[in-house]
Amino acid sequence: MTTFVYDFTDGNKEMKALLGGKGANLAEMTNLGLPVPPGFTVTTEACQEYLRTGREPDELAEQITAHLERLEKQMGRWLGDPDNPLLVSVRSGGAFSMPGMMETILDVGLTDVSVHGLAAQRGESVHSAWDSYRRLIEMFGRTVCGVPAAEFDQVKRHSDDPKEMVAAYQKIFREHTGREFPQDPREQLDLAVRAVFASWNSERAVLYRRQERIPADLGTAVNVMAMVFGNLGPDSGTGVAFTRDPATGEPGVYGDYLQNAQGEDVVAGIRNTVPLQDLERLDKKSYDELLGHMARLEEHYRDLCDIEFTIEHGRLWMLQTRVGKRTAAAAFVIASQLVDDGLIDADEALARVTGAQLAQLMFPAFEVGAETRPLAHGVGASPGAAVGPIVFDSARATALAAEGQDVILVRRETNPDDLPGMIAAQGILTSRGGKTSHAAVVARGMGKTCVCGAEALQVDADRRELTVDGQVLREGEEISIDGTTGRVYLGAMPVAPSPVVRYFEGELAPNADRLIAAVHRLLTHADARRRLGVHTNADTGADAARARRFGAEGVGLCRTEHMFLGDRRPLVERLILAADDHERDRALAELLPLQQADFEDLFRAMDGAPVTIRLLDPPLHEFLPSLEELAVKVGVAQALGKDPGADLALLTAVRRMHEENPMLGLRGVRLGLVVPGLFAMQIRAIVQAAVAHRDAGGDPRPEIMVPLVGAVQELETVRAEAEQIIAEIGDGLPVRIGTMIEVPRAALTAGEIAQAADFFSFGTNDLTQMGWGFSRDDVEGAFFSRYLELGIFGTSPFESIDRAGIGRMIRIAVDEGRAARPELHIGVCGEHGGDPDSVQFFAEAGLDYVSCSPYRVPIARLEAGRAAI
Ligand code: ADP
Ligand code: MG
Ligand code: MG
């Protein structure tokens, strides 16, 4: 026989999957000897069966009866006793915390008869018995029978006599359900249990689970526990408490208390609470006892706990505890402090913080204390703090941004047509949609601050205004949005740079405050533990120097194409359009010293550490004017009877080089093999720069990386040319030659390619595009939000590595590459190198290092450390 019901004395905190978090922790507190009202838990398995079949398991009723009898005996009262009734609460609670998403029904067991018994027991607070009965009819009516809350609220507006309200509520109940409010307490209990089961699939619970990625089939447990009453007068009350400040992690007494009230009054925020400290004055005995229990719980759970408690006539009862949610800053501070307290070791502290939390701490934020009352709340979809005048369409956003304004794009929701405006805007705000809406997905992809689903806003794009709370805001009025908290403020709030970034920059000492000290300590520990190196993607000496301050141990990717833009563009145009070898060589000769200077900068900034330089990668037409614009220009000139001059020759060349699919066309190593002298010039520049830096007393570690190789022969050809140049001018300096692995064929023939490579670096952006067969630039607006909705992706494969597909190619390439050449050095330089989940994967796959943008370096260090424990 399956056990579907556990007494609180039979469970423990490890049994969350079966008893739910609330039930498991109630059992744990009971067994610690804390004052928990007695009760029992119906398992998640019973709920799963109910959800599957539409009915409770056969054995359930009988098992509930047995446990109820035990509870009644223990309490010396029974359910429905006309003189002294036992009342119970029926509480939801799944394996993962879903605060407020499911149902709880209090005061189950009251009837027209037993309410008199309870009133007699209460003596002078007769009133409170009727108040409990009214609460039961309301909660039961709403959650079990779906009576609209508004109906009850209507009554509250006209009466505050609970006895009168009970009569009115019962009438509402009858009208809505066609039956009397149940007078059999056991029927009340059974229906309440079923309603809690069913609340697993309430709309808001389903939505919450989707957002938090909680599996849909776990089901909730149901906790039935003896009621205690906080509404029996001034010596009673109810409250919530935290063992430390969940916002900052500082130890101390945090919480709220409400005198003469039931638990749900605090949560609902109906009446004003007082700070928990005030309880010391109101009821010192209970206060001291509570603080003792809190210390005990924190020591036992070895973590921040939050607590619900109730005081009945001066007697303290613990109603709930769990390891509490916290901000990113608090997570670091608490983990570090628990090490100081001797409760956890440094490895465990490291396991308790995440790269995603560190990333949050690196965004600029609104200055502390500057915050005013928010204008509206939405979903914090992409973190950061953005301030600026509002605009209502993409065109205005682009126009104002071109004038140098930092605008906030406000839309009901966004679609692919809004992309230019989203790119131009400083921040994005929508009134519809959640964390997987188009706006949210695209904004996160771009690293742009975004708040979505701020439903209080009425956006009227045609009139270029929005209405909130009766207030009208027109285009150009300033607002501030917080992509972390989802809050929207009127006016421009001051933004402060992140103190954690200032510490990485060396502007704040490692002991500047508790948070910095915690970050410093945990990162230092991560560095000591990690086997994965962390390099950076940097194209300039300045970027490389910053990344080094952030802890980078080399440059994993220098993209040389950025060095071909700006005022060098004419030179590059001459190179591409050269009519003969002579003209081409002249253009190359002019580019050579410029490239060399770039590389010298990099070697200086990364002295003593590897600098991996990728030879030119993108299609050449990226350096030329657009075909359309040029065609128009020439056409206009010709129509006016003017000589288009050089533009005509340019147009002919651009036409000649036009490609239907440039990303799959003449680029990368293919370019090097067909444009004579191009790669040779770059290789020369690298070697000369290295020799110059060494001659100046430095320690350059150049690595030449060939992009887009698909066949070993491509690499061999470039390698032969490079070796010749190195032999000629390298002056004995070691130069490593390797390749990107970013074409699926390269991954699948890695054993062959390794024969010609000193190192591999996975280009996961291209590998993902080519592996999936869609281009990153084209999909994000077009269909990704739909794919996320359908669950085809959990997250975008450009954000987090697709382990099953792209990851498999990586594993094959690592295995076969190392088998062919054991000393092969292997890294990754795609965007994934800075993504926390992907870093975990690269560590598992046995890579030597990841390379990521400078701001991601600390995040990768932390995750690499976590991967090693
Ligand atoms: P949630 O998970 O939404 O917080 P709970 O099950 O914790 O819902 O219950 C809602 C409120 O009712 C809480 O404030 C809780 O403390 C209070 N409560 C639950 N059970 C009892 C009880 N047996 N006696 C008194 N108050 C209770
Ligand atoms: Mg609760
Ligand atoms: Mg690439």
Image (cartoon, rainbow, N blue to C red):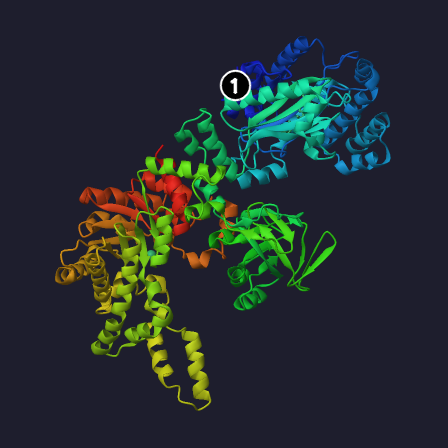
- The residue lying toward the viewer, choosing from 349 and 201, is 349
Residue 357 location (% of width, % of height): 48, 41
x, y percentage for residue 484?
55, 46
Q: Is residue 650 left or right of residue 353?
A: left
Seen from the viewer's position, the closer of residues 460 and 350 is 350
Kind of element beneath mark 1: loop
Left or right, 750 with reference to 116: left
The quarter holding residue 82 reads: top right
Q: Does any portion of residue 722 appear in the rendered image?
A: yes
- Residue name at image x 68 percent, y 23 percent: 280
Residue 80: where, in percent of width, then height?
75, 15
Q: Compared with residue 615, is residue 436 higher up or lower down, i.e. above or below?
A: above
Q: Residues within 10 Å of mark 1 (few under 14, many from 20)?
A: many
Q: Give the residue at x 57% y 47%.
A: 380
- Identify whether 687 is placed above or below 373: below
Residue to which mark 1 is pinned: 12
**Picture quadrant of ligand 3:** bottom left
Instruction: Give the quarter of the image for residue 766.
Output: bottom left
Q: Nearer the viewer, residue 117 or 275?
A: 275
Mark 1 is on which residue type? Asn
Residue at the far bottom: name it: 641
